[in-house]
Amino acid sequence: MTAWLSAVHAEHEIDMVVANAGVSEATCGTRNDPARAARVVLPINITGVMNTVVPLIDAFKTRGSGQIVIVSSLASFGPLTGSSSYSASKSAIKVWGEALRTELACFGVNVNVVCPGFVRSPMTAVNKFPMPGLIGMDEAVRCIRAGLVADLPVIAFPSSTYCLAELMSALPATARDAAARFGILPGAYFYRKKPRASRGSAATAGAASGKTD
């Protein structure tokens, strides 16, 4: 990736790079396997973005201009139950992008982090759950373009889902957990309570251990 980007930049100077690497538990078939999801989702979503951005940082700094656009997600504002690896990966690149913005500003390089909510696409088409604030691709493009023109540090949309994500991130962990259990927060529809042992299985376990009431 470094060699290819360097070659392209040498022939046609790159003014803007948009880095977006995104697979979720659903799209890579690991929804019910958190351990496998972590091994698959995290490297793709984090390393994929870094491999696209890092080769151009020095070139942009030397030239004194350039724009880096990192595509994160509203999932980066707080953990989504059932999408732990996706949330973690998007949180990592959001924080990295925000930090890069402050580090590269003095070199004349702009960095923007895009945090979309649910957008109609092949990726969201596989979701089998309600998607609050779902918008079309054209509307998402308009939001991103307007945010880039205004040079917003974080371009988050749609506003309704963004406000909910901000609320979720502001809650203490204990309150967020309680809200998820009652189906209040995004992603709560994935929540699964531990199965209760039936009386028969409890009696069998007691007998096997030699314990009786």
Image (tube, rainbow, N blue to C red):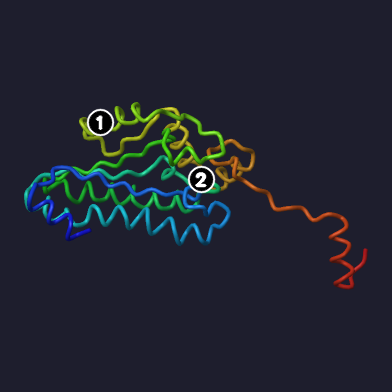
Q: Going 21% across and 47% down the picture, which residue do you hit?
A: 102
Q: Going 84% across and 60% down the picture, which residue do you hit?
A: 201
Report the front residue among 39 and 72.
39
The residue carrying pointer 1 sits among few (fewer than 14), some (14 to 19) or many (20 or more) residues within 10 Å by Cα, namely: few
x, y percent for residue 48: 32, 55
Q: Is residue 132 above or below residue 71?
A: above
Residue 162 lies left or right of residue 2; in this view the side is right
Q: How far is disc 1 from disc 2 in space, using C-alphas?
A: 27 Å
Q: Is residue 114 above or below residue 97?
A: above
Q: Amino acid at mark 1?
A: Arg
Residue 199 lies left or right of residue 161; in this view the side is right
The residue carrying pointer 2 sits among few (fewer than 14), some (14 to 19) or many (20 or more) residues within 10 Å by Cα, namely: many
Q: Is residue 114 above or below residue 45?
A: above
Point out the image quarter for the C terminus.
Answer: bottom right
Q: Are dots 1 and 2 in contact, CB under 8 Å?
A: no
Residue denoted by label 1: 145
Residue denoted by label 2: 80
x, y percent for residue 119: 41, 34
- Give the SS element for disc 1: helix
Give the image quarter of residue 72: top left
x, y percent for residue 137: 36, 30
Report the front residue among 93 and 212.
93
